Image (spheres, grey):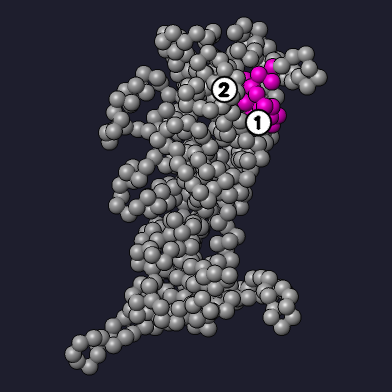
Amino acid sequence: MPAPLTVKGRGRGKGKKTSLTPEEPGAVWNGPEVPDTAQQLPHFCPKRAPGVQGFVGVEYTPAQIFRHFFNNQAVNIICKNTNKNAEKEQAKGKKFVWEELKPVKFLMYVGLMMFMALLKLPKVRDYWRKGSHLSVLFPASVMTRDRFMAISRAVHLSDPDHDLANDRKKDTPEYDPLHRLKPLQATIKEACKAMWQPRKEISIDERMVATKAKIGLRQYMKAKPTKWGVKLFVLADSSNGYTIDFSIYTGKSRFISGQGLSYDVVSGLMDNSYLGRGYHLFVDNFYTSPKLFTDLFARGFVACGTFRDNRKNVPKSKLNALTSKSPRGSIRWLREKELLFVKWMDTREVSVCSTIHQAFNGDTVTRNVYAKETGKWQKENIMAPRCVVEYNKYMGGVDLSDQLIAAALLWKPTAVPAHTTTSTEDTVGEFKWAQSPSTSTAAVGECETTRSAVGTSDSDVIQETASDNA
């Protein structure tokens, strides 16, 4: 490791030498020719062997995997609260036919929504349309359209009585904006962690769940394909996009550590109790800060991410720094213990902070470069820091997960008050049926769209269907 840089002190005397830290303006950026020695990395010691958990060495169906995310306890709670909500709606004078929702029927309802994710039709009623050569036979064999719409109208995750108690706490610290999601959210989060132990490289990024609902959780993100929706902070396995854990953004006031939203998000998702130690985390410049990376290193995690020049405690020095005229492939770096700060010139300047890498290991990347001599574009190998190479390789875990989800979006028929939507879909009573993108089974694995895909046997379905005249 190079000796600390020194500068003469100001004022009277002979000029006492003082060590400079990278964030001080007098620190001098090193070039790639200066050797760098990284700190010893924590040994990779996951809590479990990386990979699938629970199904190793045994045959399983997609339905069995799905039921780990929608287990019996969660389904029973949803059915209980949905029945209670339907009774309350009828007591308010809402006119619709309701029959007690049982777990088997609810799973059939979920199976129909998966079917609709794979076979998309313009309107909900088109799935039950008869007398046409384009008629679909499967939905009507599972349940009637009126029954399906009644369930969609009444489905409720939380206890309606508890909802009222929580609503009365609005604008107070005791109010929980996620109360209505908690029963299913907790089950899915635990299943995500239980079913898969991630490999060494993981990443954290935002995900937008599209919604047109007028709720306080709705956010706008210009850079995302889904501009409006509920924002999730997702921890994903970089090798396959599997969602390991997630948290839902409820407002900055909910993060009270004093270190900022990004610090609290990462600290909450990086949990030693189920991850273990030695994981390599990759994040973008929203999360990267010297304080976060130093604290993660102390907990046995190392990290790499792009950083913003206006972040607290990042290098501010301009001595030997890159300029707009620096040639492509130019590298500058500074180190403070485990923290490495790297600047690299590509088509623009790239700033990376890492507790994983050395400044330069001799890596190169291929770029198309315009040759003035020939007037043509040609491929050229230029120097690149390994932290940049691996950041580009491993940062896309959440984006990969989003791509898998987009392959089979679940367009869920959602009952919303007529005055809160501009949809022109089917109208039932006071409600319009708007198709809105929801979560998908694609991120978990392919799921059958037959009755068995939701864990019910043919005999159960036939028996339940026969007794369901709604």
Q: Is residue 79 above or below residue 204?
A: above
Q: Residue at x 68, y 71 (%)?
A: 368
Residue 259 horizontal/vertical position (percent): 32, 54
Total numbered badges shown on the rendered structure: 2
Amino acid type for the residue under numbered disc 1: Ala
Picture disc at residue 433: 2
Q: Is residue 431 left or right of residue 3?
A: right
How much space separates mark 1 and mark 2, taking CA atoms? 16 Å
Magenta residues, as a range? 106-128
| Left or right: 135 as drawn, with respect to 206 | right
Magenta span includes 177: no
Residue placed at 64% from the left, 71% from the top? Answer: 365
Q: Nearer the viewer, residue 178 or 302?
A: 178
The residue under label 1 is 117
Confirm whether residue 449 shows in the render. no
Residue 264 position within the rendered picture, expressed as x and y whole percent measured from the top left: 37, 50
